[in-house]
Image (tube, rainbow, N blue to C red):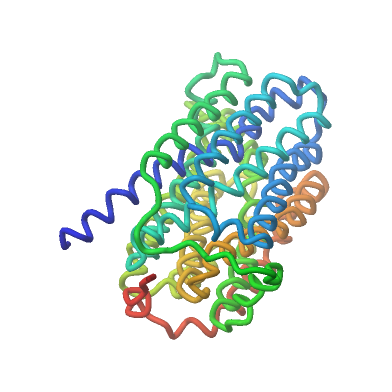
């Protein structure tokens, strides 16, 4: 590795660490699901609405960034740091001031609004520091997003005697640490701010990215992936409960639902990192396709597994967790390659916003179906991987050389 390349890797490590801290806000409420169910009498469907409040806030934030062009007009590091601070405050307000589902949803919406300036802008920061290794670097970034998603479950597991409010507040503290790291690091040298142009029709500019066929193929592949990802994560504790109960009935040490949920989500971080490494050999499009195929296969097969085959179900969940998010950084790498350079930030946040709009529908449908259908409800997720694979077909001929040639002026 050249000296210049080594220097570009050090900022990437700081960015992915800040991403881990900032995105711990995302599912912090899910770590308190049992407490909130008892405290406020919530149902599985209510918890789905609580998750969706974050998603809707994220969608509103990303679409605002995309349509106004803010993501390309101001330094990504400033937006990331400011949104991390705001997200920490809104998350703390959720812990301190929520009195029921309605107020909790309002605070979680604001948390999602803030995360819109953390996740997509983290991707832009990665490209600004290390554009030539986007697939590998974004693999690390989304791996940290995945670990950040799992982190509240891990905090809950480690601090079993802690109140749910303290678990939530730990995520706020981590987000503040992430803000400090990015404010200190700043933006990389490879991307420039978009100049202001008088009387421009800003709302149409981000749509120009979707007129590029290769960007459109990547984006629509990502949309299929998003139908599955967050819906799977949102019902994961429910999928883990019968496995944990079955293991407890058989005697021996059974993990807690929080521990098992943490482990299944966290293994996706490993999938992201290994997928990023593999993309250097076979290309991001092929890694994304393999991960989509693997998770789609689990959507089909998991409901068919015998209920008493605990080891088989456990192995299937870990394989599913590994595959279900491993494609996400590769879609981002492809989109950053094919988006017009002057619209990179807006294109990425628009792609994220539409993708998360899709998750709102899938989470609502799945959370309502699970109590009635049991594990058969997971078949609802099958269309996502299938449509994602169909959209990705035009890019499967591209290899790693295409991504190694990526650079931004």
Q: Quadrant of the C terminus?
A: bottom left
Q: Does residue 367 appear left or right of residue 311 in this picture?
A: right
Residue 239, percent from left and from top: 64, 43
Q: Residue at x 50, y 40 (%)?
A: 81
- Quarter-of-image position of residue 385: bottom right
Q: Residue at x 49, y 31 (%)?
A: 176
Residue extending furthest toward the front: 198
- Quarter-of-image position of residue 353: bottom right
Comparing 61 with 268, the one in front is: 61
Residue 374, percent from left and from top: 75, 48
Residue 363, percent from left and from top: 73, 51
Query: So how many labels did they put on this image?
Result: 0
Q: Does residue 240 appear left or right of residue 130 in this picture?
A: right
- Quarter-of-image position of residue 245: top right
Residue 251 is at least partly visible in this image = no
Residue 108, percent from left and from top: 71, 36
Q: Does residue 180 appear left or right of residue 244 in this picture?
A: left
Comparing 324 with 70, the one in front is: 70
Q: Does residue 59 appear left or right of residue 168 in this picture?
A: right
Q: Residue at x 69, y 22 (%)?
A: 35
């Amino acid at each position: 590795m050249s000296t210049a390349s080594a220097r570009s890797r050090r900022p990437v490590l700081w960015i992915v660490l800040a991403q881990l801290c900032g995105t711990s806000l995302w599912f912090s409420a899910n770590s308190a699901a049992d407490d909130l169910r008892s405290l406020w009498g919530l149902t599985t469907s209510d918890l789905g609405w609580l998750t969706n409040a974050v998603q809707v806030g994220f969608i509103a934030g990303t679409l605002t960034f995309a349509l106004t062009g803010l993501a390309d007009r101001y330094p990504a590091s400033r937006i990331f740091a400011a949104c991390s601070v705001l997200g920490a405050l809104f998350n703390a307000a959720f812990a301190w001031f929520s009195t029921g589902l309605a107020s909790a949803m309002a605070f979680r919406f604001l948390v999602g609004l803030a995360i819109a300036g953390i996740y997509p802008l983290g991707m832009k920061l990665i490209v600004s520091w290390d554009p030539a290794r986007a697939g590998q670097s974004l693999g690390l970034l989304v791996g940290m997003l995945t670990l950040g998603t799992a982190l509240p479950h891990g905090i809950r597991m480690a601090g079993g005697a802690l109140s749910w409010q303290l678990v939530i507040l730990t995520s706020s503290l981590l987000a503040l640490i992430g803000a400090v790291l990015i404010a200190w690091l700043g933006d990389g040298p490879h991307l420039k701010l978009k100049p202001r142009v008088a009387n421009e029709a800003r709302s149409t500019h981000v749509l120009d990215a979707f007129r590029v066929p290769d960007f459109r193929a990547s984006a629509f592949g990502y949309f299929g992936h998003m139908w599955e990802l967050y819906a799977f994560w949102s019902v994961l504790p429910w999928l883990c409960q019968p496995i944990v109960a079955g293991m407890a009935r058989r005697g021996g040490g059974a993990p807690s639902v929080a521990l098992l949920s943490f482990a299944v989500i966290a293994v996706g971080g490993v999938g992201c990192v290994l997928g990023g490494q593999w993309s250097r050999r076979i290309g991001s499009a092929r890694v994304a396709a393999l991960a989509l195929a693997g998770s789609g296969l689990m959507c089909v097969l998991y409901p068919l597994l015998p209920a008493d085959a605990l080891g088989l179900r456990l192995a299937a969940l870990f394989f599913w967790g590994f595959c279900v998010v491993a494609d996400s950084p590769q879609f981002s790498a492809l989109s950053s390659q094919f988006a017009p350079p002057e619209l990179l930030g807006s294109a990425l946040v628009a792609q994220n916003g539409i993708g998360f709009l899709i998750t709102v529908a899938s989470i609502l449908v799945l959370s309502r179906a699970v109590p009635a259908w049991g594990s058969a409800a997971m078949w609802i997720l099958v269309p996502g991987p299938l449509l994602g694979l169909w959209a990705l077909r035009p890019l499967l001929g591209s290899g790693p050389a295409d991504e190694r040639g990526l650079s931004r002026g």
